[in-house]
């Protein structure tokens, strides 16, 4: 993402610059194809995951957790009535309760009527309560995510994509470089020229974090909720400390992935959506020269 | 400035988008492709651990309160009579593709060799509870009944007429609960007909007189109020033919995930 920062990518008007803009082959075909399959799979996994969560909108820590296990519940999305009899939605984390009426706990359904449901209908797939369909789709796209992810990893290891493009260099990990990149992002100053051809440290950390921590973690914690997998591979729950714990981490990782997607899309928009999206479809990325003033 | 507010337009287009998305979940080619994942998951799990045992816990891990789910008490007259008689005249019939059909009383089941296991019950909704179960291994009964060679599935017929619940999508069409498993799970050592829970006779809420424990699958496979066991070659002929009450309502027959 984040590289070229022209405000108007469509206008190819020649700038009075010594070095003209040119198209650079940025993303390999395998990366582009796996990116879009992954995007589709994750979109469905999030929508169906939120629908599945709605069937029991509480999270617990440890080996067991159900309605009466208040001591083990650390998060709940629900609804209640105020003393005056006014319904409200809430998110409760530990002893902290935040009112979230209209979004979480109580929201307008497809018909526009308020309904008591953890995640709102616009965020879930299907938009109505349907645990059975949500599960069908969730597990189908989980297979897609895993197979597609393995193909991506195989290609990226063999081609050197991970080593050359994603692995941070030691000097990039210096505090001053990271602070510099944060400042550049905050100023919405995106690299130009040769610098626009490679990922910078925040990108490397974000992509690497998703590829090597969040996605493997969400797959493992997902498998940790499967009783059949638990019997075959007990080490997964040994690692996470129980099925309710695994479910909790699955939810946390899902939220981090949602956060990543929001920031990712925001950066695409800020860095020049036409050029960025084209580079992930055709592979071609326009490199603008550095402006010297 | 226009007659239609931006927000109204946004809500309307959002509604159309949602309706379009929901179409994807309706029965059809796409849905059948999506449902093929169930077979993949089952074959994969059988590959990595056909004989794996579900984790067994210690008494210290027991849930302080084990949630009663599904039917809390069957209303049917036949069941109510059995309950009033403390299941003294209840008999478990093992029929179908067996050379030696059996009919066992609760007293007989209780005197048979039993397995006790402390395991975790995982509801499809997402909660888990740990309980101790004691009962006869299903494999032992099936061996005694001497199955015919074309036997492929074991069906559990239950006493309760069931009508669904909100968390699983709201009210469902009512019918007698039933469940089924294949022979791999039927002969798994932890597959038992539990007559006791946490050291006491099974309560009505948890499925008295006996319920299934199939420890590598989700809660809806753990049929309560079992009245009869049929050994069959096909699941057609029971409900809508998908092999269980919830399966007929869209849930996976293989509930190992």
Image (tube, rainbow, N blue to C red):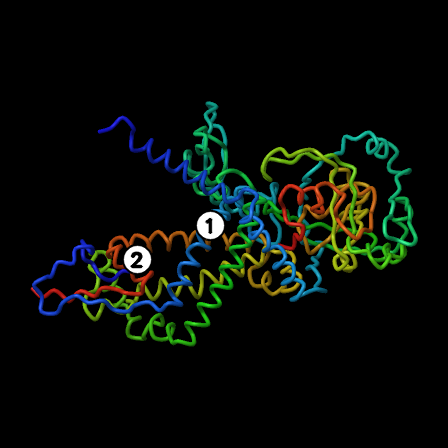
What SS does tag 2 mark? helix
Picture coordinates of residue A191 (x, y %)? 21, 64
At 69% across and 56% down in the image, what residue appears?
B216
Which is more N-terminal, label 2 or label 1?
1
Rendered position, B230 above or below A158:
above
Q: Chain of mark 1?
A: A
Residue B199 is labelled as none
- Give the labeled residue for mark 2: A277
Q: Position of residue A184 (x, y in %)?
A: 21, 61
Q: Quadrant of the C terminus of chain B?
A: bottom right
Which residue is pictured at 69% across the width and 57% down the height?
B57
Image point 46% across, 53% down: which residue? A254
Q: Identify the residue at horizontal 19%, vertical 67% (top origin).
A: A22
Residue at the disc numbered 1: A46
Which quadrant of the rendered structure holds the N terminus of chain B?
A: top left
Q: Quadrant of the rendered structure where residue A3 is?
A: bottom left
Using the image, determine if residue A58 lies above or below residue A86: below
Q: What is the quadrant of residue A223 in the picture?
A: bottom right
Q: From where the camera sits, is residue B65 visible?
A: no
Between residue B228 and residue B61, name the one nearer to us.
Answer: B228
Q: Nearer the viewer, residue A171 or A195?
A: A195
Marks 1/2: CA distance?
Answer: 22 Å
Camera-side residue: A140 or A85?
Answer: A140
Rendered position, A139 above or below A24:
above
Q: Residue furthest front?
A: B29
Whether residue A115 is visible, yes or no, is: yes
């Amino acid at each position: 993402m984040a590289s070229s920062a022209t405000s108007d990518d469509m206008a190819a008007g020649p700038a009075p610059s010594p070095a003209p803009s040119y198209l650079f082959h940025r993303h390999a075909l395998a990366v582009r194809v796996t990116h879009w399959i992954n995007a589709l799979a994750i979109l469905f996994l999030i929508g169906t995951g939120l629908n599945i969560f709605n069937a029991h909108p509480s999270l617990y820590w440890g080996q067991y957790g159900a309605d009466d296990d208040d001591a083990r519940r650390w998060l709940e999305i629900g609804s209640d009535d105020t003393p005056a009899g006014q319904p409200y939605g809430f998110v409760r984390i530990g002893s902290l309760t935040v009112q979230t009426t209209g979004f979480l706990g109580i929201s307008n359904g497809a018909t526009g009527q308020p309904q008591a449901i953890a995640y709102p209908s616009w965020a879930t797939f299907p938009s109505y309560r349907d645990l059975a369909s949500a599960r069908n789709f969730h597990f189908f796209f989980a297979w897609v995510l895993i197979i597609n992810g393995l193909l991506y990893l195989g290609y990226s290891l063999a081609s050197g994509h991970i080593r050359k493009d994603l692995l941070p260099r030691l000097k990039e990990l210096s505090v001053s470089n990271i602070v510099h990149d944060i400042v550049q992002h905050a100023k919405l100053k995106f690299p130009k020229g040769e610098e626009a051809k490679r990922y910078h440290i925040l990108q490397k950390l974000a992509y690497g974090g998703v590829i090597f921590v969040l996605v493997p973690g969400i797959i493992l914690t997902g498998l940790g909720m499967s009783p059949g997998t638990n019997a075959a591979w007990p080490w997964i729950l040994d690692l996470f400390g129980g099925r309710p714990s695994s479910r909790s981490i699955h939810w946390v990782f899902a939220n981090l992935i949602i956060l990543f997607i929001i920031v990712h899309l925001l950066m695409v928009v800020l860095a020049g959506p036409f050029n960025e999206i084209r580079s992930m479809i055709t592979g071609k990325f326009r490199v603008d020269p550095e402006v010297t003033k | 400035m226009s007659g239609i507010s931006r927000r109204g337009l946004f809500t309307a287009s959002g509604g159309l988008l949602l309706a379009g998305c929901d179409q994807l979940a309706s029965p059809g080619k796409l849905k059948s492709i999506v449902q093929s994942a169930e077979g993949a998951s089952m074959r994969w799990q059988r590959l990595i651990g056909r004989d794996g045992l579900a984790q067994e816990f210690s008494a210290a891990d027991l849930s302080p309160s084990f949630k009663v789910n599904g039917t809390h008490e069957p209303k049917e007259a036949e069941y109510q009579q059995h309950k009033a008689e403390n299941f003294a005249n209840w008999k478990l019939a093992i029929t179908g593709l067996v050379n030696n059909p059996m009919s066992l009383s609760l007293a007989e089941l209780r005197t048979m060799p039993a397995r006790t296991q402390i395991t975790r019950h995982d509801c499809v909704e997402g909660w888990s509870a740990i309980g101790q179960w004691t009962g006869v291994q299903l494999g032992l009964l099936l061996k005694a009944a001497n199955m015919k060679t074309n036997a492929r599935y074991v069906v559990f017929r239950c006493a309760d007429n069931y009508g669904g619940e909100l968390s699983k999508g709201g009210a469902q069409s009512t019918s007698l609960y039933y469940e089924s498993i294949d022979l791999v799970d039927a002969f798994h050592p932890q597959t038992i007909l539990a007559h006791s829970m946490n050291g006491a006779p099974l309560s009505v809420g948890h499925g008295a007189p006996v319920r299934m424990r199939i420890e590598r699958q989700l809660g809806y496979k753990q049929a309560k109020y079992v009245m009869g066991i049929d050994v069959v070659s096909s699941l057609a002929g029971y409900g809508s033919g998908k092999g269980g009450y919830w399966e007929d309502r869209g849930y996976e027959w293989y509930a190992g995930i």
